[in-house]
Amino acid sequence: MINQEKYHDLPDEELVTLTLENQNIFSILIERYEEKLKQYVRRITNISEEEIEDVLQEVFIKMYKNLNGFNLDLSFSSWSYRITHNHVISHFRKKNTRPQGISVEELNDTVLENLHTDINIDKDVDRTILKESLLKAISKLDEKYQEVIILNFFEERSYEEISDILQKPIGTVGTLLNRAKGQLKEILLKGTYDA
Amino acid sequence: MTHKELQQIVLDKLKREGACPTPRWHFLLKNYFVWCFALISLFVGSLGFAVVLYMTINNDWGIYENIHDSFIGFVFATIPYFWILIVILFLVTTDYNLRHTNKGYKVQLHYAVLGSVLGSVILGTLFYNVGLGRAIDETFVKSVPYYEKVMRDRHKRWTSLDQGRVGGLIIFTEDDDSITIQDKEGNEWIIEIDNDTNVFGKMEVGNFVKIIGEFHDEKFEAGKIFEGKKGPGLAPFPGGHPNIHPKMLNKGMNQFRDNKKWMKEI
C-alpha cells in the first residue's frame, strides 16, 4: 500500500500522472470520488446498493484503463462523471432496460430552495408536500431533462461541467435546463405527478 | 462497503487482470482518424459541389424552351440529383466526424452544419474554377456504368438528332451555307445554313457550337446556332468533348473535306 498522507493535497490531474507510474496511487482517486459517484449513480438509476457497488467497481476499472485518454483541458471530476454516466447508460442498454428515476430521500433543503427559486413555484406550499411533489415530478420528467436537473441541482455542476459530462454544447445544456424547468413547472401545476 | 474495501477490490481486480492503461497513442490515433475522415468527407463533398456547380452553370438555361416544354419542367428534369445527394451525404459525414473529435461536442449543431456547408461551398467553388467539376463529370461518363442513365441522358442532349439537337466542334467551314462539326462521340455532321438560320456567335473552325434544327435526308438543317462558352471549368457541352487540339484541325482538313463530299453523296 502507499502512504496516503503524502498525496492528499495533490490535485486530481497530478494524481492521474502519478497513477500512470504507480497503479496503487489510483486508490486515492477512488477514495476522493467513491462517495460522489455512488451518490450520482444512485440518483440517476435508483438501483439497489449492491448493484451500485458493482457498477462503481466497473466504472473505476474503466477509468483506470482509459487514464491515458484523460484530456487535461477537462477537470478530472467532469471526466469521471462522464465515464460514470456513459457506463450507466451502456450497462442498462445491455440489460435492455432504462435507468429509473431518482432516490426520494435525496432532496435536501439547499436543492429544494434552488429548485423552488428557479421554477418559481408558490412559496406558501408546505415544504414536506413540496419536497414530495417535486421528487415525484422530477421522476416524471423525460430522461434527457432528468439528467440535466440532477447534474445542475443535485450535483451542483456548472453549465460547462454538464456540457463536458454529457458531451453536449453549452447552449444545448442551457436549452435543456430551461425546458426541463418548464416541464417540471407544468407537471407541478397540473398535478400530474401522481398519475 | 467502506472506502478501503472498494479501493482494495478495484486494485486487486486490476492486478488480477493484469490491467494497464490503454496507451496514449491509441487515443491520439483515434482522434486523428476522426479528423481525417472529417477532412476526407469535406473534400469529397466539395468535389460533388464542384460538379453540381458545373452542371448548373452549363445547363443551357438560355435555350431551355428548345429542350423542355416549360421552365419549371426543365429545372426539375435537369437538377443533378445524384450529385446533390453526394454533397448532402458527405456533409452529414463531415459533420458527424467533426462532432466526434475530442472537443467536437462543444460546437452547436447549427454552427457545425454551417461550417461544413461553407467549407464545401468555398472548396467546391475553387475546385470548379480549376475545372475539376467538368473533369469528374467526364470521367464518370466514360467509366461509370449507368451514370448516363442516372443523369437522365443529359450528356446525350446534344447528340439527339431525332429531337433536333446536335452540338460539336467546328472542324470545317467551306462557305456560308454549311459547316462541318464533330460531336462528342466523334461523329461528323454537315450542317446546312440558310437565310432563316439564326446564328449567335462566331462560326469559326475550333469553336464549339450547339445547333437546333431538323434532321432529314441525311442533312441537318440549322434553325439556331449558338456558340458555346469557354471559361474556367466550363464545358461547352455537358459531358465534355473529345480532346481535339485546334492546331490539329488543319492537318485533318482534307480528310474532313472528303468526308463532307461523301456525306453529301449519301
Image (cartoon, rainbow, N blue to C red):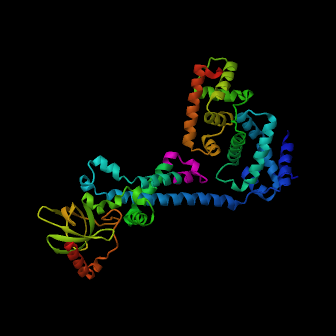
At 22% from the left and 75% from the top, the residue drawn is B260
Magenta region includes residue B99: yes
B209 in magenta: no
Q: Which quadrant of the structure image shows residue A122? A: top right
User: Between residues A148 and A143, which one lies in front from this camera angle?
Assistant: A143
**Image x and y of residue B243, in percent:** 34, 73
Given the current orientation, which residue lies at the most extreme right position? A1
Question: Could you say where residue A169 lies in the image, as x and y percent from the top left?
Answer: 57, 44
Residue B188 visible within the image: yes
Q: Is residue B111 above or below residue B214?
A: above
Q: Nearer the viewer, residue A180 or B30?
A: B30
Q: Is residue A120 visible?
A: no
Q: How many marks?
A: 0
The x, y position of residue A90, in whole percent, is 70, 43
Q: Residue at x 29, y 67 (%)?
A: B230
For the stretch drawn in magenta, the main secondary structure is helix
Q: Is residue B183 left or right of residue B149?
A: left
Q: Is residue B114 above or below residue A119?
A: below
Residue B50 lies, with reference to residue B186, above or below; the image says above
| Residue found at the far left of this picture | B195
**Is A43 left or right of B136, judged from the image as shown?**
right
**In which image quadrant can residue A178 be found?**
top right
- Residue B178 lies, with reference to residue A123, above or below; the image says below
Per the rendered image, the range of residues in magenta is B94-111
Residue B237, quarter of picture: bottom left
Q: Position of residue B13 (x, y in %)?
A: 84, 50
Q: Is residue B234 left or right of residue B180?
A: right
**Along the viewing direction, whichever of A7 and A34 lies nearer the viewer:** A34
Compare residues B216 and B84 and report the one nearer the observer: B216
Horizontal side of residue A50 vs B243, given as left or right = right
Q: Where the N terminus of chain B falls, by quadrant?
A: top right
